[in-house]
Each structure stands twice: as structure tokens, then as C-alpha cells.
């Protein structure tokens, strides 16, 4: 169950816990500020396997490009 | 008197973005008496992150919980008094929709400023395992306390997280040694915890917020609002782009028709209803404004008589102010439509919907709004690129947005379209827009590939918060509309005004500085003759080329002047007649139209390119690129024209 995957691999409706973010300093910090901190719970609102994925963190919906989503490591719940 | 300063919208006080640096330096400047931090009542935990960071920076904060009228709809209950007593600062719920809480807020501002109520010291957050590291950095900094403009503990936390601006400050005002000590403390923390201190600090801040909010916020489960279901369609890979594109297309068609009558007039014309087309054009906004200014000018000639002063006032100043005012209603209509999209929450959904399509030319969904604004006026469009997260992407956009024909150029295209002898005007209009968008797409793709090969950019990404859909508030829509209109008036207005006087001078005086009635003897005409060989490749010999060359020189200043200067130079009453006098054939008209669309849009756009990029290099590069591409496209158009 505790397989770590990147955020872009989660299907719509799935919830997961953020493990870590691997990215440039600017991007990583911006994500922290938006509530994407390790330990935070993300819910995938929509992921069509193509184009931006929409996730909900702390009640706020955010559109994330796939390239960014690939840098967010999560643990599915 | 209470004066409000609106700081840029930010997520925190790092020094990553220019907005964050502006905000924090302004707060620290000592200028503001009190800082109002807005917290979204619907998502208090997330938006408290900024508030908490503000409190670490300064104690003089009032928390303003917005959208307080909506909390019950979302099943959220907030105990404002409890939060107030926990943080020792005023916490005021307000609603822009109902006006609730605004008076109370004003009272509290006065209380805090005049009676010194509220906190005395900045908030200290327990960063747990980071505390010893923060303390040792603070210890180093405290030796340099004289003239240090930042709160020491705050600066220590920021330096532990890695903050470029503060590091530069340390290097400049303390020493390289101090900076190295601080950096080694950060590296030590990093190696002990195997994590970036910035990550740990963010986690601890959210923990603090959670422990704070758990005691003051109660939530009851409510059913998902109906907007949520509808909004999911925008995320669909096929429906999303179609829905987004349709919304933008409808808005723009309406704005275009109200403004110039196009494309409704062309449609009527094509169907054979010439009279109806004429009416649509006459009662379009630019038609009506035109009549108004012609009326005023005629009246002034009657009252003031013919003199150099009258010429200056009528042709120079009224002509110039008129040129701005003609576009004002359109800019307002476009700004208004975009404000509706923004305030309703549709705008970010459209950006998501268009993202995939736009990535093919190397830009992200963030480019949608600059791109649509460009169809109205390039000036606010270039300012709107500020929201683009990647600098290289923003740079590419700023350089290429001027290819998109604004309303001033639409007016020129429409006028040239009426002058064609053998082809339908609608075809030229369609061709013009097609070429413009094609060039925009190709050059963006090209610049993107160049950037990518140099390793200066990564694939365009979107990172965008999506607020819930709601009915737009008239007041907010008005604020947004006015703010972008104001930008246009200030930037474009001042330049067009000066330019009009300059043009008047260049067309009314000879190179020997004597006043001339005949524009063909003016400074501008002299310049045009020197440059006219440039137009030889499109079959214009020197004696013919000076008139189009002259109008293009004038058009450098502002595009709408192309038409009026063509009329002045030929002494004709309408464009059809002017084109005949100038001896231009259809392929030449088409070529000149394309050149007009693509070369430098106007001085105001150049000014805003410079002021946004602060770089002469890129501004000059943009000019050279536009001229070159415009010229090539003109030649291609001409040769296609003579083939048929």
C-alpha cells in the first residue's frame, strides 16, 4: 500500500499524502507556500492523463502542469 | 484621513518574486501605520499562511476575513473573538457583497493607529528542531544591529530558509565571513535533518496554523455546490479548450461589433445588405466618436478661424486626444468582459482549458489573458504578462504579443479593405488576422526552441489557484475594469498626446523649419523620400513610394494615424480615393496592410515593453524583429497577390 508515486500518476478522486518535492528552489518554495508541504493531504479533482491535473489541497483547488506534478512524490491513501 | 496602499497579491514574504520583495520592503519601510491582511473565510487555513508570515514581520496587523457572508453556505463557522484573543490583534469579518464589517474595520484601523492597540512584538512561531539554528543566526546578526532594517529573528528564519535578497544585504552591509557562517549553519541543518530547512519551516508554519485554527474554526459537511460540477468540464482535454475558446470568441465578437461594426458589417455586405452594413458601421462606437470629433474640429475652425494655432489645436491636440478617446470605450468593453471572467472565477478555468493548446507554441495557459487583451490593445496586454510565472516565457510573450492586431490596427485593416478593387475586403481582413496569429505562433515556437536548446527554459508549466465559481460583484468588476483602463490612459495617453504634437510638427514644417501647407514638402515627406527605396520590391518606384513610406513612418507612432496621414498626404476624402491617387494596386494594398499589422504597433507599446523589461537590448531586438518579419511578410503577401 505504501508505494510512493508521483502526483501525476494518481487517478481522479484519489487522495494521497505528500512525501517530498524534488525541484528547483523557486518552484519548491512556491509549492510550499501554496500548501504543498510534506505531510499535507492532496485530493485529485481531475486527471485525464493529459494536460494539467487539478488537485485540492487545504480546500483550495489548484491546476498543476504535468511537469510540476511529476516533481511531487506522494503516498496514496 | 486614511490612505490605503494596495500591495501585490502574494503567497508569502520570501524574496522569490518581485511582488514579494516589493511587499515586504514596503512593510518594513515604516511607511504603513497598520497592515491589513486579507484571509479568505472559505479557506482560512490556506490563506492564514500569509497572515502568519506578516505577523512574523510586524506586529501591527489587522486580520480581515473576507466573504464573511458566504461562510454559512459552505458550512464554516469561525470564532473571530477567540482568534483575536489568541493572536492579540484585531480580527474583523467583512463582506464586499453586503458591505458588512467595513465601518467596524475603519474604527479598528483608527484604534490601532491612534491608541496603539494590538500586539507590540512580532509573532514568534515555534520552529521546533530549527530553533537552535535560528538562534545562532540571530546571534550573529545581533552584533550588527545598528542600522539593520529587518526584525532580527525574522531575518534569521529567512536566512535559514535561504533568501537571496537578505544574503545580498549581509554581504554588502556585514561581510563575506558573516555570510559564510550563516550559509554553513544552513548546510549543517540540511545535513542533520536530510531536508531543506525551508521545507521544515513551511511545515512548522502550517502546523502552527492548524493548531490555531482547530480551536476557532468549525466545519459542517455541505453538499458540493452546483458550480463545481459544471466547472469540471473545463478540465476535460477536449471539452475544455472548446468551451474556453467559445467563451473568448463570443466576448470578442461582441466587443468588436460594438466598437467598429466588424465583422457584422462585412457579413451583411457579403449577404448583399449594403445599407444595413453601413448603418452598423455608422452606429458603432468608433463611428460615433469619429463623427463627434469631426463636429468639434469643424466648430473650432469656424470660431477660431484659420491660423497655425488652430491647426495645432485641431490637428495636433484634438486629433491626438480624439485618437485616445476613440479607443477608450473599446478598451473598457474588453476590460469589462475580462473583469467578468476574472471575478466569476471563469478566467483561471479558461487558462487551464487552453493550456495544452498553448504549450504547442511554447507558452502556458497563463498566456491566455495577455493574448486576448492584445486584440483590444497591446499596452495592457504586455502589463498582464506579469502573472506569468516563468521569466523566459514572459520575455518571449512580451516580444511577440505586439504581432496581435489591436483595435487601432483593425481600423487600418478595415479601411484598406474598402480600397480593394478586385478582391473582397472580407478576404483581406481574414488574411490579415490569419497572418498575425500565424506569425505570433511561429515566432513563439521558434523563440521557445532557441531558449530550450540553450537550456534556458523548461517546458511551459501551469501552477494556478482556481477559486470557486460565483456571481460577479458589480463593484469588483468595475474596479478591475477601471484599473486596466487607467493603465491604458496613462501609458498610451501621455505618449499619444506628445506624439500628436510631434506629427503635427513633422507634417507642417519643411526641413528648413518654415510652415508649409502642402504635406509633400514637410520634414516627414523628406524623410519618407529617403526611405522610399525600401518599397521598391513591391513594385513601387521612388516617385510613388513616398506616400506609403510617409504613412508608415507616421504609423510608427500610432497605427490609427496611418489612415489620416494617407488622407492628408493625398488630399483625398476617403481611402478608396487616396489609394487611387497614390497609385496602389490590390497586391500592394494587401502587402502594406500586412506590414502595418506586424511592424511596431505604436510608441506606447514600445514604451511599455521597455518599462516592463528595463532593457534597451530587448526593446531594440523586439523592434528589429517586428520590422524584419513585417517586411518579409509584406513581400510574400505581394508576390502571392500578383500570382492570382
Image: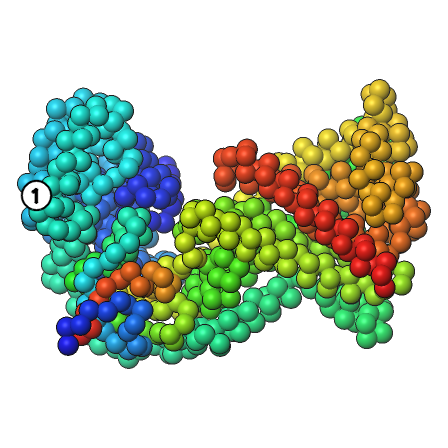
Q: Quadrant of the N terminus of chain B?
A: top left
Q: Chain of mark 1?
A: B
Per the image, the residue denoted by label 1 is B131
Residue A5's spot in the image, x, y percent? 23, 69
In the depicted view, which residue is nearer to us: B100 or B492? B492
Q: Is residue B81 above or below residue B54?
A: below
The answer to whether residue B300 is visible is no
Helix, strand or loop under label 1: helix
Q: Nearer the viewer, residue B40 or B612?
A: B612
Q: Residue at x 31, y 77 (%)?
A: A12
Q: Is residue A26 left or right of residue B426?
A: left
**Residue nearest the observer in this picture, B86 or B182:** B182
Q: Is residue B257 above or below residue B9?
A: below
Q: Is residue B563 above or below residue B318?
A: below
Placement of B591 over or under B498, stated as above or below = below
Residue B498 seen from this side: yes
Residue B112: x %, y % from top left: 22, 40
Which residue is painted at 12% across and 24% down in the image?
Answer: B143
Point out the image quarter for the C terminus of chain B: bottom right
Query: By what rule are the colours in the image chosen?
Result: rainbow
Q: Is residue B343 left or right of residue B188?
A: right
User: From the viewer's perspective, is B113 left or right of B410?
Assistant: left
> Which quarter of the figure has residue B618?
top right
Number of residues whose C-alpha sits closer than 10 Å to that of mark 1, classed few (under 14), some (14–19) or many (20 or more) = few
Amino acid at each position: 500500500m505504501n508505494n510512493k508515486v508521483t502526483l501525476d500518476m494518481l487517478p481522479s478522486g484519489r487522495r494521497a499524502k505528500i512525501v517530498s518535492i524534488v525541484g528547483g528552489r523557486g518552484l519548491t518554495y512556491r509549492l510550499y507556500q501554496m500548501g504543498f508541504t510534506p505531510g499535507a493531504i492532496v485530493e485529485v479533482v481531475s486527471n485525464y492523463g493529459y494536460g494539467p491535473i487539478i488537485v485540492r489541497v487545504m480546500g483550495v483547488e489548484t491546476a498543476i502542469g504535468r511537469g510540476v506534478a511529476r516533481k511531487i512524490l506522494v503516498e496514496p491513501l | 484621513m486614511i490612505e490605503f496602499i494596495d500591495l501585490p497579491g502574494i503567497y508569502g514574504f520570501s524574496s522569490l518574486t518581485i511582488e514579494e520583495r516589493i511587499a515586504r520592503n514596503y512593510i518594513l519601510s515604516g511607511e504603513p501605520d497598520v497592515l491589513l491582511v486579507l484571509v479568505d473565510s472559505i479557506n482560512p487555513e490556506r490563506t492564514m499562511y500569509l497572515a502568519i508570515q506578516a505577523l512574523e514581520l510586524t506586529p501591527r496587523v489587522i486580520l480581515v476575513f473576507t466573504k464573511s457572508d458566504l461562510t454559512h453556505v459552505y458550512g464554516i463557522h469561525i470564532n473571530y473573538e477567540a482568534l483575536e484573543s489568541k493572536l492579540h490583534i484585531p480580527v474583523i469579518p467583512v463582506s464586499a457583497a453586503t458591505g458588512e464589517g467595513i465601518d467596524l474595520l475603519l474604527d479598528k484601523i483608527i484604534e490601532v493607529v491612534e491608541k496603539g492597540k494590538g500586539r507590540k512584538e512580532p509573532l514568534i512561531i515555534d520552529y521546533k528542531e530549527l530553533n537552535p539554528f535560528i538562534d545562532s543566526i540571530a546571534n550573529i546578526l545581533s552584533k550588527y544591529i545598528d542600522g539593520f532594517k529587518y526584525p532580527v529573528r525574522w531575518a534569521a528564519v529567512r536566512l535559514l530558509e535561504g533568501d537571496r535578497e537578505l544574503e545580498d544585504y549581509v554581504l554588502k552591509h556585514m561581510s563575506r565571513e558573516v555570510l559564510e557562517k550563516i550559509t554553513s549553519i544552513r548546510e549543517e541543518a540540511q545535513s542533520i535533518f536530510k531536508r531543506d530547512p525551508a521545507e521544515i519551516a513551511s511545515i512548522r508554519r502550517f502546523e502552527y496554523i492548524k493548531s490555531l485554527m482547530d480551536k476557532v474554526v468549525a466545519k459542517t459537511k455541505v453538499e458540493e455546490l452546483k458550480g463545481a460540477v459544471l466547472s469540471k468540464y473545463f478540465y476535460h482535454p477536449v471539452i475544455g479548450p472548446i468551451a474556453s475558446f467559445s467563451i473568448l470568441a463570443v466576448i470578442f465578437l461582441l466587443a468588436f461589433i460594438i466598437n467598429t461594426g466588424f465583422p457584422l458589417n462585412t457579413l451583411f455586405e457579403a449577404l448583399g445588405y449594403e445599407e444595413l452594413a453601413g448603418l452598423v458601421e455608422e452606429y458603432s462606437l468608433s463611428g460615433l466618436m469619429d463623427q463627434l470629433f469631426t463636429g468639434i474640429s469643424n466648430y473650432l475652425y469656424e470660431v477660431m478661424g484659420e491660423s497655425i494655432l488652430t491647426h495645432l489645436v485641431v490637428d495636433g491636440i484634438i486629433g491626438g486626444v480624439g485618437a485616445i478617446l476613440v479607443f477608450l470605450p473599446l478598451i473598457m468593453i474588453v476590460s469589462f468582459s475580462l473583469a467578468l471572467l476574472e471575478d466569476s472565477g471563469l478566467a483561471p478555468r479558461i487558462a487551464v482549458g487552453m493550456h495544452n493548446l498553448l504549450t504547442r507554441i511554447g507558452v502556458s495557459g497563463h498566456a491566455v489573458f495577455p493574448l486576448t487583451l492584445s486584440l483590444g490593445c497591446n499596452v495592457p496586454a504586455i502589463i498582464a504578462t506579469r502573472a506569468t510565472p516563468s521569466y523566459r516565457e514572459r520575455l518571449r510573450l512580451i516580444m511577440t504579443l505586439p504581432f496581435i492586431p489591436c483595435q487601432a490596427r483593425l481600423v487600418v485593416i478595415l479601411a484598406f479593405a474598402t480600397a480593394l478593387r478586385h478582391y473582397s475586403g472580407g478576404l483581406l481582413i481574414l488574411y490579415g488576422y490569419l497572418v498575425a496569429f500565424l506569425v505570433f505562433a511561429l515566432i513563439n515556437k521558434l523563440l521557445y526552441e532557441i531558449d530550450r536548446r540553450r537550456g534556458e527554459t523548461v517546458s511551459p508549466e501551469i501552477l494556478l489557484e482556481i477559486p470557486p465559481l460565483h456571481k460577479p460583484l458589480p463593484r469588483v468588476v468595475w474596479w478591475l475594469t477601471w484599473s486596466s483602463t487607467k493603465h491604458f490612459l496613462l501609458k498610451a495617453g501621455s505618449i499619444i498626446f506628445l506624439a500628436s504634437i510631434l506629427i503635427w510638427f513633422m507634417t507642417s514644417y519643411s526641413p528648413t523649419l518654415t510652415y508649409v501647407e502642402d504635406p509633400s514638402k514637410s520634414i516627414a515627406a523628406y524623410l519618407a523620400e529617403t526611405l522610399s527605396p525600401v518599397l521598391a520590391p513591391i513594385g513601387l518606384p521612388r516617385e510613388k513610394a513616398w506616400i506609403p513610406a510617409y504613412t508608415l513612418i507616421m504609423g510608427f507612432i500610432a497605427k490609427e494615424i496611418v489612415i489620416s496621414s494617407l488622407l492628408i498626404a493625398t488630399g483625398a476624402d476617403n481611402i478608396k480615393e487616396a489609394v487611387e491617387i497614390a497609385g496602389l494596386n490590390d497586391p500592394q494594398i494587401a502587402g502594406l496592410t500586412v506590414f502595418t499589422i506586424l511592424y511596431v504597433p505604436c510608441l506606447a507599446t514600445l514604451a511599455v515593453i521597455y518599462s516592463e523589461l528595463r532593457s534597451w537590448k530587448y526593446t531594440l531586438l523586439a523592434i528589429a524583429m517586428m520590422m524584419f518579419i513585417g517586411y518579409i511578410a509584406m513581400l510574400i503577401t505581394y508576390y502571392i497577390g500578383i500570382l492570382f
